[in-house]
Image (cartoon, rainbow, N blue to C red):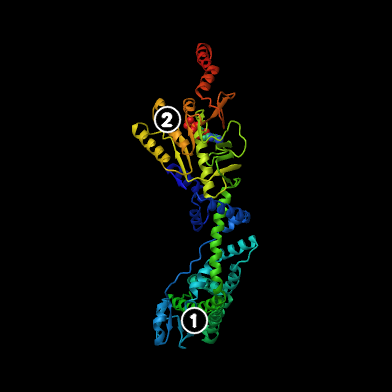
Amino acid sequence: MRLNSEARAIYKSIREEIKKRIQLKESLAYLDKFEPTNDKKEILRRQTYFKENFPRIVPELKGILAKIEPIRFKKDFLHDRLLVVDESELEKAQALGVCEVSTEPLEGYDLTLSTVGIGIDVELSISEIAPELYIMPLWENRETLKALSQIANLLGEKSVAESILKKLGELEEIMKRRELIENLDELIAEEERRLNKKIAEKLERFSLTLTGKELLEFLKELREGDYGAIFKHFSEIESEILEEINEAEKRLSERLNFTVELFSRENLYPIEVLPESIEALHQELERELKIELYLKSREILDEIKHLIPKLREEINKAYELEFLRAVKEFTEGFTFPELIEGGITFINGRHLFIKNPQPVSYVVGKAPIEFNGVNGERVVILTGANSGGKTSLLELTSQIVILTHMGFPVNAEKAWVEVLDELFFFKRKRSIYGAGAFETALKSFVRALTSDGRKLILIDEFEAITEPGAAVKIIAELLKIAYEKGFYVIIVSHLGEDLKKELPFARVDGIEAQGLDENLNLIVDRQPKFGVLGKSTPELIVEKLYRAKRGKEKKIFERVWRAFT
Ligand SMILES: Nc1ncnc2c1ncn2[C@@H]1O[C@H](COP(=O)(O)OP(=O)(O)OP(=O)(O)O)[C@@H](O)[C@H]1O
């Protein structure tokens, strides 16, 4: 379906409204598949798609879908491992591009894998040599896996995410240790602080025990040269401190699942661990962890690898579901239009961008139901009060027509729409006047009339850019051509009376200000009256002033007002 630039702007604003509701950026691409089309079958296909899928969208899905994140399996070069292969396999192994390859063992790698028995046995495949490339993205995206499994539960379906999550559970312990190792410095520092505090307490107690009577005893022993007794005091405290050190190391060993010997037995207070010792321990632990992680990943991958294609499918389905959910949210209370021949009709249409709009019903062409004053006119002149809602009605009509051609439900209680090839919307441009604007508008109007096809042409106050007298002649002639070509036209004009004389085939509708409320404000009925020229507002303004004023002024306003009646 072709849209001129202003109709396209309305289409874009509709897209923006839907986009705003889409929580996952991967779901946005689905919107591109719903460009307005003039292919009736395609519109019907889209309608069926939405009708079939909307019932699956339950409110709980919103929060769960928001948690989905893409799981990306990226090829990476792992510098921690060496793959030793036979000369004949060298090229193939290097082509995998996941780690260093050699025909003989080399120093400096945490892991040595091999197809020739020099290290951990592997086959030449990425999943055997670098299973972590699959397992780590899955592990890091457990929230997404959980969400997928919850979605499947809500929809009464089965998800492979559940089985994958279950297997990944086996990594839990290794991952906890990995976290500990990452925080090794802090862990040791904490143990060091605790140890020093304990030792300080002991030393303090020790010095206290030497005061008073025991101090005299100690001096006596010293005098008598009883060194054995003196050393006994010291060795007691020393063994207590050594005991504390042993316990601290035991605690660390248990937490890290690795025998730790870190604290010096020579300088007992304050205890200080050398950074080099921590670094050496760190390296050793990491090396061990890498091997464990590799072996576990390989084992898990072996069991879940066949589920990964299905998982990808499920993630794509979730993106699609999010798109559907956003569309359903946007079109809450909308209805699927019926595709008919002969016109465009809607009942209680609600403008998308007006807050709490008054619903409006409208017809151009043949209406499938009875409307007073409507006789299948394809050309309609919309007249009426200033700020009555004429422009808004053209916008509303565009919104309904565009949504129909997107295959979406429309913002009305009921709608019957003919499938069109083109939609033209000529907006009044308040800011540009003069010959230039007139020429441009005239050219694009004529362009809309030249080609054939099924068209709806919406024009907002064309006369505003030229003199009313000339405007009647120009508009009348152009509308005759539109009529002859079988196009649908709604034109907003204040020249309804004059145009009607020229165009017997056209209908004139009016949006009327119904009068003044108790505060003398205009009451506007946004619903146009079919076949009735809109009462214009100036006379109501005169009436308002006549009623509001007093004395001599009132008399003058009364006289002016009577001129209308
Ligand atoms: N159906 C509606 N329900 C509630 N408010 C509406 C409706 N239609 C229009 N309005 C409000 O009325 C005001 C005027 O609307 P609009 O510009 O469409 O009127 P208009 O008849 O084209 O005016 P003008 O003759 O000055 O161009 C806008 O603020 C709009 O939000």
Residue 211 makes an appearance in the image: no
Rendered location of residue 38, percent (x, y): 50, 49
Report how many numbered discs are placed on residues in the image: 2
Indicate the quadrant where residue 369 lies: top right
Question: Mark 2 highlights which residue?
Answer: 463
For badge 1, the amino acid type reads: Arg
Q: Residue furthest front?
A: 484
Q: Considering the numbered disc 2 on the image, is that residue within a helix, a strand or a loop?
A: helix
Is residue 201 placed above or below 330 in the rendered structure? Answer: below
Does the image show residue 378? Answer: yes
Q: Is residue 462 left or right of residue 158?
A: left
Position of residue 449 measured from the top left corner of the image (x, y, whole percent): 42, 39
Residue 189, percent from left and from top: 49, 71
Secondary structure of the residue carrying numbered label 1:
loop
Q: Which is nearer the eye, 176 or 379? A: 379
Mark 2 belongs to which amino acid? Glu
Residue beneath disc 1: 265
User: In the rendered view of the protein, which quadrant contains the C terminus?
Assistant: top right
Ligand 1 within 8 Å, label 1 CB: no
Query: Tag 1: Cα neighbours inside 10 Å, few (<14), some, or many (≥20)?
Result: few
Task: Give neighbour class at mark 2: few <14, some 14-19, many 20+ (Cα, 10 Å).
Answer: many
Q: CA distance from mark 1 to mark 2?
A: 100 Å
Q: Nearer the viewer, mark 1 or mark 2?
A: 2
